[in-house]
Amino acid sequence: MKLFISFPDQSKSFCAGVEYGKLYDRMEKGETHVTNDGFPVRKENQELLKNTCHKLGYTYSFGAEYYGEWIEFTAFKIQTSKN
């Protein structure tokens, strides 16, 4: 099989962007619970994820770090009650 689009390198920044884009899409759609499907996220995305959570109304948690490059991430949509 041939790729329709192939990327010229395997840079970490490309991978970090793909990972962030997937998480951003989930938050933009308003999912109540957002994770990286059970995998940690790249530490390069930590500040970007914090800022995104603040802007889109999520509370977040970062957990254990792995190999100095990865960190656990979970976000929950902040729900308000009309009571």
Image (spheres, grey):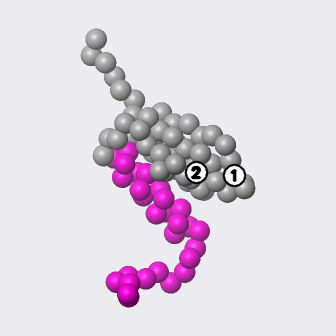
Image coordinates of residue 79 in percent, x first then y, are: 35, 26
Tell me which amino acid carries mark 1. Answer: Tyr
For residue 60: magenta? no
Question: What amino acid is labelled 2 in the image?
Answer: Pro
Gap between marks 2 and 1 measured at Cα: 8 Å
Instruction: Tell me if residue 77 can be seen.
Output: yes
Please, which residue is most extreme toward the bottom here?
Answer: 2
Which residue has dot 1 on it?
Answer: 66
Kindly identify which residue carries mark 2: 40
Tell me where residue 83 appears, x and y as whole percent.
28, 11
What range is drawn magenta here? 1-28
Residue at horizontal 67%, vertical 43%? 64
Q: Main secondary structure of the magenta part?
A: helix
Side (left or right) of 22 relative to 67: left
Determine whether 25 is above or below 30 in the image: below
Image position, residue 27 (x, y; %): 38, 45
Q: Determine the secondary structure under disc 1.
A: strand
Judged from this view, the residue extending furthest toward the left is: 82
Q: Nearer the N terminus, badge 2 or badge 1? A: 2
